[in-house]
Image: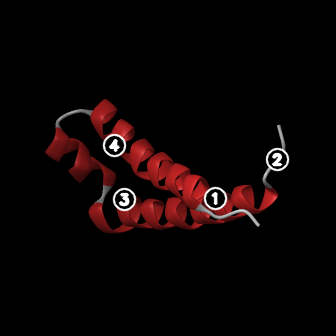
Amino acid sequence: MKIKKRKIKYSALFFLCWFALLVFLVDGVLKFQTLVDYFGSYTWVEIALLLMVILPTWAVYRFTKEK
């Protein structure tokens, strides 16, 4: 299996930027406890945040064109 460095590079860069943005929003703007109160469960908030990071990162990896 050939490693596709370009795809991994773009996905990693997207992951870091998206993760930093979500950390800023959740910890700074929305306050994590507010989200827990809204969803009613710490587990649901964690799963939602993980999916919000993993799924877009996977999509960037999947749809990045390799030359």
Nearest the viewer among 8 and 63 is 63
Which residue in the protein does label 4 denote? 48
Residue 23 spot, x, y in % from top left? 46, 60
Tell me which residue sits at (82%, 47%) in the image. 3
Q: Amino acid at mark 3?
A: Val
Name the secondary structure under disc 2.
Answer: loop
Which residue in the protein does label 1 denote? 11
Front: mark 3 or 2: 2
- Name above or below for residue 64 compared with residue 51: below
Give me the C-alpha separation between circle 1 and circle 2.
Answer: 13 Å
Labels 1 and 2: the sequence-earlier one: 2
Front: mark 1 or 4: 1
Labels 3 and 2: the sequence-earlier one: 2
Q: Amino acid at mark 2?
A: Ile
Count how many numbered circles sit on residues in the image. Answer: 4
Residue 9 lies in what quarter of the image? bottom right
Name the secondary structure under disc 1.
Answer: helix
